Image: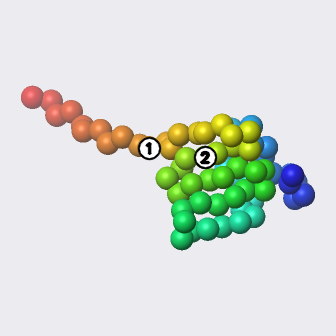
Amino acid sequence: MCQHKPTCPSAEATDREAAVVVSAHPEQGWSQLCNGVLLFDDTGEILPDGKIIQPRRLTATTPRVAA
């Protein structure tokens, strides 16, 4: 799909989010990348084969205080 030089990462690559945005819809919270990935504002993804990648949410941690 990608026509860029150098080519963008494939949808199966671990760095697939680095592909170029070809269609942005910030009002709806998603963008389509040139590798066919739908990337959502919450960091979730849908791959071209229909596989869903769950959002990567950071969890807050409370520092432990020595007593």
Q: Earlier in the sequence, mark 2 or mark 1?
A: 2
**Residue 15 makes an appearance in the image:** no
Is 64 above or below relative to 25? Answer: above
Q: Is residue 34 left or right of residue 64?
A: right
Q: Which residue is mark 2?
A: 45
Give the percent coordinates (x, y) of residue 30: 59, 60
Q: Amino acid at mark 2?
A: Glu
Q: Residue 29 occupies which quadrant of the picture?
A: bottom right
Q: Residue 2 occupies which quadrant of the picture?
A: bottom right
> Real-space Cα distance between discs 2 and 1?
13 Å
- Tell me which residue sits at (69%, 58%) in the image: 32
Is 6 above or below relative to 52? Answer: below
- Tell me which residue sits at (54%, 71%) in the image: 27
Q: Residues within 10 Å of mark 2 (few under 14, many from 20)?
A: many
Q: Secondary structure at mark 2?
A: strand
Which label number is shown at residue 57? 1
**Residue 43 makes an appearance in the image:** yes
User: Looking at this view, is 12 or 61 the one in front?
Assistant: 12
Q: Do callouts 2 and 1 mark residues in contact (Cβ within 8 Å)?
A: no
- Tell me which residue sits at (66%, 52%) in the image: 38
Q: Amino acid at mark 1?
A: Arg
User: Looking at this view, is 25 or 21 the one in front?
Assistant: 25
- Tell me which residue sits at (64%, 60%) in the image: 31
User: Looking at this view, is 32 or 59 the one in front?
Assistant: 32
